[in-house]
Amino acid sequence: MSPTRRDFLAGASAASFLLTHHSAAQTATGRVTLDAAQTRIQLAPPEFPQTEVWAYNAQVPGHTLRHTRGDILDVQLKNNLSQDTTIHWHGLRLPNPMDGVPGLTQAPVTPGSSFDYRFALRDAGTFWYHPHANSVEQVSRGLAGVLVVDEPKAERPDVDADEVLVLDDWRMASDAVIRDDFGAPHDMSHAGRLGNYITVNARPEMRRAAPAGGRLRLRLVNTATARIFDLRFRGLQVWLAALDAMPLETPTKVTEVALAPAQRADLLVDITAEAGEEALIASVERDGTFALAAFDVTGPARATRPAPAALPPNDMPKVDLNEARQVPLVMAGGAMRGLPDGGMWKGDRMDMRQLAGAGQFWAFNGMVGMPDAPMVEAFKGETIRIPIDNRTAFAHAMHLHGMHFREVLDGGTLGPWRDTLLLGAGQTREIAFVADNPGDWMFHCHMPSHQMSGMMNWIRVS
């Protein structure tokens, strides 16, 4: 029998540990080395053998890199894998050569070689890093980590703890081996690579003590390749304070949070359960609602705090819809609906059968995969509106590199800043962004099975 979500939940009250932040070793100059290599960890419960994974510095998730806004990030990637890799710094507004997309912003980092990433951290918030080469396999095998960029000390919220929760799933066999069916046509043409085993910070259970009445800052990061986490809370009063690293103007009290692949949410959480009780974060799945994280509540209770204030905003551009140029995007393909008109791939028009034979199932505006010409060519400072029509039978998490966008809502109002937007099957949504970061930037579905089978394009800002 292979490890499953129920194995994870069966142990939810069996162990207790405190979450910790792991910091990568720094040189005297402040440089961090991330060594991408094969290793083994105890990923499944103790009754299963260790699992061979790919990891940064032999740790899954990779070290939580922690800096303060305005710092210089200085990281050397060493590739000790058997295939090319890179690091993409997800959600960061950074110089284009540092974005980590092989063939677009940098040459791939070949086995045995290294690459230096160095840039200023413009924004505070919760970010993450992962490969942008052969992403289905490399992320599924464990290559992912979190980057926390703190606000200046005087601007940080008053909390009793600040914790990172990395939500992930794994597709494992009965011997705790990660299944190597990374190019499975069913995954590529359907909902993506869904795992059978859920973890929080790569542990089969997450449990810690928390004071009654305490306030926590919980940084949730979805590093799964396809799973959309639908979260519920018990014994907790929860305010949504930031999405995809960008603070909301006012923290919003919530009872549920949905996180698509690559999305992040910063929660400010008050423990309302009594001493001796449990407070829970749970995930709603098709076969039930299951605890992901549990807090053993201890007394005496802390004094009640007022509702939290907003996190300090990052310096974002003004989105002026009146001056915006509109570039529509139609998403098509996948199982059930397909590509009846075929599509253009690598400069050739192919029918649906030919595309499927090449492992390609999706198209943006009739283009399959990365075309020679960008979907959008914008001048620096121009505002672009992209209405996105998802004509497929599946959800997609659309991610824009190098810049954040806002959703255009009814009446022309603007939603919160995001870098990844979830579009349900058949939905039409619209985003707007200021093209203020020069370079060539990917715009793609962040379900890697979809990305690598057609759902990627790019935007040029000059």
Image: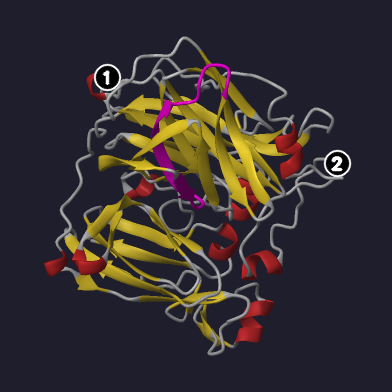
Residue in front for this viewpoint, 270 or 341: 270
Please state which amino acid type lies under the numbered disc 2: Asp
The image position of residue 289, as x and y in percent, is: 63, 46
Instruction: For the N terminus, give its image quadrant.
Output: top right
Q: Does residue 212 appear left or right of residue 43 in this picture?
A: left
| SS assignment at label 1 | helix
Q: Give the magenta-colored segment's residue range.
A: 256-277
Q: Which mark is residue 153?
A: 1
The residue at the far front in this view is 274
Instruction: For the C terminus, give its image quadrant.
Output: bottom left
Residues at badges 1 and 2 in contact (C-beta under 8 Å)? no
Q: Is residue 344 magenta?
A: no
Whether residue 403 is visible here, answered yes or no, is: no
Q: Which residue in the protein does label 2 denote? A: 175
| Whole-number angstrom distance, CA of label 1 to CA of label 2 | 46 Å
Figure label count: 2
The image position of residue 145, as x and y in percent, is: 52, 36
Q: Is residue 237 above or below residue 342?
A: above
Task: Compare marks 1 and 2 and give the one earlier in the sequence.
Answer: 1
The image position of residue 403, as x and y in percent, is: 30, 52
